[in-house]
Image (cartoon, rainbow, N blue to C red):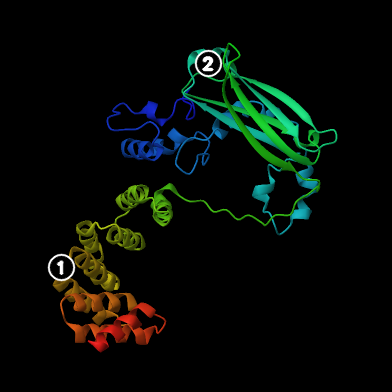
Amino acid sequence: MYDPVSDGPYALIMDKKDLDPTEYSALYDRIFELAPTLAEAAISIVPGEYNSDFSPSTRNSIVMAQILDSPKKDINPSYATHFMNYKGIVSTEYMTNFVESDSCLAILLEIDGATEELRQGGEVRGVFRGLRLNAPVLKEFKLILANCPPGPVLSLDKSIPASELAPDYYELKLSLFDAAGKVLDEKTAHFIVSAEPAIGHPIANAKVFPLSNRFVYLYMLAGIYDKIGDSARARSYFEKAYGLNPQFMEGVGQYGNFLVKTGDFDKALELAEVFRTDDRRLFDYYFLKGRAYMGKGDYGQAIQNFEQGNRIYNSDTRLLNALGLCFLRTDRKEDALGAFRASLKLNPQQPEISKLIAELGTN
């Protein structure tokens, strides 16, 4: 049986040319091209159980491992007697499978690139250690790798009832051993078990995000990488998002700003043509083209586009300032003064523009 975690979507593709087995977004796109109905199942047997980068989640393995036991569980019918407590908050469709549960600590871990020798003889040893001075809790456990199905990624999980852990600050240490007892890797994490029986939290309202609209998410990622200065990743996500939906105008505008910012002026001019067919976006069309020509040093073309944009909307200080600079660089000082003064009238809090006007006024 195919396992998204241990096998991975890469295993389903016959023609693997130019594909990276770790680029799950690209793998999803390729499978979607070949068999759209298979794409989501390739990354998750359980609907919706995959990570933000479209990599399979270890939750798949956990759910599938427990699926045969689920019908045998002694389900407490308290959902029926407690229903009135939730009247007006939770609808009946969400109360159907209400099951009382106790809090527990869940550990999910993956071992990537494990050899068959390691799987057969290796193990993970874990230690919970309370950090208080008086009678700290100390618990140990062991996970045998041979219990995992063969594959490039080994997925393991461990649950411990919270009732076994007294309120305290805890340290969790995980150690990976090979068959000879040699430590191959170690990781440490910290967590807190609260003394409060219940911790207040806001009501969560989650909405389904269809995969057909994932270009919005990719644009968000592109914007984040742009803000932190990672232009290479930002460009990659902008290209992916634009490729999925070239007519998403908000995203095209973001992409165009990025291209001008990074100096790819020819690509920005090409992208601007998307706006040309939409009357509501003609200002964006001329403004993007003007900035691209300005970046290329073609101030004549830049001025023409800025003036066209200004006829559509004459109250954008960004356009007026750019137009003024183009006038200044073509020795049209009076026109530059006019553009800068119009901009300053709209927003007096522009010290750089005030300085330029003062300098031009004295020459």
Instruction: Report the residue marked by disc 1.
Output: 298
Q: Which residue is mark 2?
A: 118
Q: Quadrant of residue 38?
A: top left
* 223 left or right, relative to 104: left
Q: Residue furthest right?
A: 134
Whole-percent x and y of residue 77?
77, 40
Q: Residues within 10 Å of mark 2 (few under 14, many from 20)?
A: some
Residue 101 visible (yes or no): no
The mark total stands at 2
Please, what is the three-letter code of the amino acid marked with disc 2? Answer: Leu
What secondary structure is found at the residue carrying circle 1?
loop
Asked where in the image residue 125 lies, by quadrant, the reply is top right
Residue at 25 percent across and 85 percent down: it is 360
Disc 2 to disc 1, C-alpha distance: 63 Å
Say what secondary structure mark 2 lies in. Answer: helix
In front here: 113 or 360? Answer: 360
| Amino acid at dot 1 | Asp
View extreme (top): residue: 180
Q: Residue at x 33, y 83 (%)?
A: 343
Residue 275 in percent (x, y) is at 26, 66
The one nearer the camera, 183 or 222, is 183
Q: Is residue 145 above or below residue 292?
A: above
